[in-house]
Image (cartoon, rainbow, N blue to C red):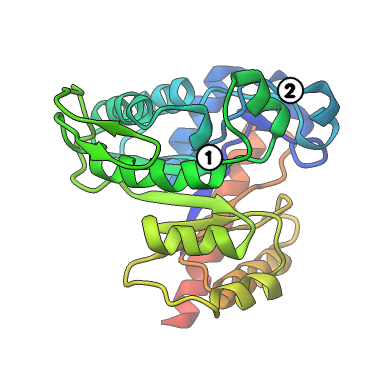
Amino acid sequence: MRLGLSTPVVMQIPGVASAWEREADVAELAGIARAADDLGYDHLTCAEHIAVPESAAEGRGVTYWDPLSTLGFLAAHTRRIRLATSVVVLGYHHPLEIAKRFGTLDRLSGGRLVLGVGVGSLEEEFALLGADFQCRGARADDALAALRASLSTVRPTYDGPFYRYDGIVVEPCAVQTHVPIWVGGRTLRSLRRAVRLADGWMPFGLGVSELSEMLSRVERPAGFEVVLSTGRPVDPTGDPTGVATRLRQLRGAGATVVTCSVAAASAAHHGEQLAALKDIADRLEGDVQ
């Protein structure tokens, strides 16, 4: 079970983000990314919302850094850690836009892209962007198939119900021959979509029993990633026993990767928490072995 990091600062959800994140500068953000990289974390994340309606701000927050710009910046400050969108909303973009922009990121980062995608749920944002909300599920399925056909080739072709193209060149493209695609969501439908069209599932907002029940209902292919979240921020230095219990629960539910949020009073404290969390996880892995 590997650990990823829900990158602080770049997404600030009320009641989840720490107070220091509101005033953090990019040097602190880069330092945290380097620390996670040096400690052996699997990935960093960045979400996507283009414009959050004020009516939704109380629950979702309003701070969402652009994932392409942010992950490109973090790529330049790291060496090994993967760069995961969590998530790009498929309905907001043509598949070739995603293939070109994030394929360029894959090239710049030396093949470290993990493309996390989602169907989307914020109807007002769809309307603002002129995107189709009612057919978003069917469009997402077609977009996923189009992306798989297009991410790693400069001459992509595709013929689906919503997207069709041929005789074109997209240069650069991703350098990975198979870019990992993880599907976000919190429904059995999203899990089945991930099993059928992608390489992993990263649910949110579900309890351990719900996750276990959903995962028991599908046959997952070899190598399929189950990317679970710690949920609310954990406190590795203040409550190591509680953190270990949470990681055991997620591993028991089927996690192959855990995306972690940590509580911190400052950027420096965040780095200390990352080191303590990695130590707890390493000890758990030692116990299993």
Residue at the extreme front of the image, as rendered: 161
N-term-proximal mark, 2 vs 1: 2
Q: Say which amino acid is labelled 1.
A: Val
Note whether residue 41 is visible.
no
Residue 200 image point, x, y percent: 43, 58
Q: Quadrant of the C terminus?
A: bottom left
Numbered disc total: 2
Note whether residue 68 is visible.
yes
Disc 2 and disc 1: Cα gap in Å?
22 Å
Q: Nearer the viewer, residue 212 or 6?
A: 212
Q: Say which amino acid is labelled 2.
A: Arg
Q: Nearer the viewer, residue 264 or 10?
A: 10
The reply to whether dot 2 and dot 1 touch (C-beta < 8 Å) is no
Please determine whether, in this image, residue 35 is positioned above or below residue 222.
above
Q: Residue at x 82, y 40 (%)?
A: 15
Helix, strand or loop status at disc 2: helix
Which quadrant of the view contains residue 167? Answer: top left
Per the image, the residue denoted by label 2 is 22
Residue 37 image point, x, y percent: 41, 41
Q: Residue at x 55, y 26 (%)?
A: 29
Residue 97 image point, x, y percent: 36, 24
Is 87 positioned to the left or the right of 100 in the image? right
Instruction: Assess disc 2: are there few (<14), some (14-19) or many (≥20) residues with their C-alpha within 10 Å of its C-alpha.
Output: few
Helix, strand or loop status at disc 1: loop
Q: Nearer the viewer, mark 2 or mark 1?
A: 1
Is 206 positioned to the left or the right of 216 in the image? right
Q: Residue at x 35, y 34 (%)?
A: 163
The disc label shown at residue 87, or none: 1
